[in-house]
């Protein structure tokens, strides 16, 4: 499968960018509605969407959730230093903690950088204690986010790709 994906062209064209932008603006829109919005045949939109998914450009249609509205008002970034050879054990453990919403191996200080949410600071302490239940974590560093200045976004990248053509 990786071989097949590596043979596919990289990048997107104007119609792909317009389709991605329309999906972001109206994520619940069906193929017929997207075709109407973009002035393109339904079959063209379906084929483009299928290709974007097959290439891994569009990876899902999950709802975009506002974590604070769900009661998770505390966001923290936790850096973990992992004992040699224990990364897989630690990652498996973290995957079973719902409040760990992302984990990335990193370069520089620390081995693993986690995005963690909690309802309160007290709950965050409980989550951190649960993280530390697995052996293999040598040291942690936690930074609590105060306010979001730039939220997660990808549409500016879509526009930038088109500007490079």
Image: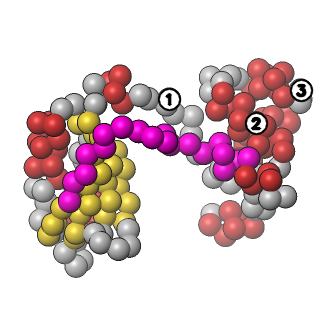
Q: CA distance from mark 3 to mark 2?
A: 11 Å
Residue sitting at 50 percent across and 29 percent down?
63
Q: CA distance from mark 1 to mark 3?
A: 26 Å
Q: Position of residue 68 (x, y in %)?
A: 34, 27
Whether residue 8 is situated above or below residue 148 in the rendered picture: below
Q: CA distance from mark 1 to mark 2?
A: 18 Å
At mark 2, the secondary structure is helix
For label 2, count other residues whose C-alpha is less than 10 Å away and answer few (under 14), some (14-19) or many (20+). Answer: many
- What residue range appears in magenta? 141-159
Name the quadrant of the N terminus. Answer: bottom right
Q: Nearer the viewer, residue 133 or 54?
A: 133
Residue 48 visible in the picture: no
Q: Position of residue 115 (x, y in %)?
A: 33, 49
Whether residue 56 is situated above or below residue 150 in the rendered picture: below
Q: Earlier in the sequence, mark 3 or mark 2?
A: 2
Q: Earlier in the sequence, mark 1 or mark 2?
A: 2
Name the quadrant of the C terminus. Answer: bottom right
At mark 1, the secondary structure is loop
Question: Disc number at residue 19?
Answer: 2
- Residue for badge 3: 39
Residue sitting at 11 percent across and 36 percent down?
122
Q: Is residue 152 left or right of residue 122?
A: right
CB-based contact (under 8 Å), mark 3 and mark 2 = no
For label 3, count other residues whose C-alpha is less than 10 Å away and answer few (under 14), some (14-19) or many (20+). Answer: few
Q: Is residue 145 magenta?
A: yes
Q: Earlier in the sequence, mark 1 or mark 3?
A: 3
- Residue for badge 1: 63
């Amino acid at each position: 499968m990786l071989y097949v994906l590596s043979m596919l062209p990289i990048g997107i064209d104007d119609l792909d960018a317009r389709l991605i932008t329309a999906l972001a603006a109206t994520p619940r829109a069906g193929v017929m509605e997207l075709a109407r919005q973009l002035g393109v045949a339904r079959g063209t939109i379906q084929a483009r969407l299928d290709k974007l998914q097959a290439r891994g450009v569009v990876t899902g249609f999950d709802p975009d959730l506002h974590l604070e509205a769900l009661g998770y008002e505390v966001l923290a970034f936790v850096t973990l230093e992992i004992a040699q050879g224990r990364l897989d054990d630690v990652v498996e453990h973290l995957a079973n903690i719902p409040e760990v919403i992302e984990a990335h191996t990193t370069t520089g200080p620390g081995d693993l950088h986690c995005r963690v949410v909690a309802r309160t600071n007290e709950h965050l302490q409980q989550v951190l204690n649960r993280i530390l239940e697995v052996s293999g974590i040598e040291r942690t560093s936690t930074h609590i986010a105060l306010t979001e200045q730039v939220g997660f976004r990808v549409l500016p990248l879509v526009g930038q790709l088109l500007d490079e053509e």
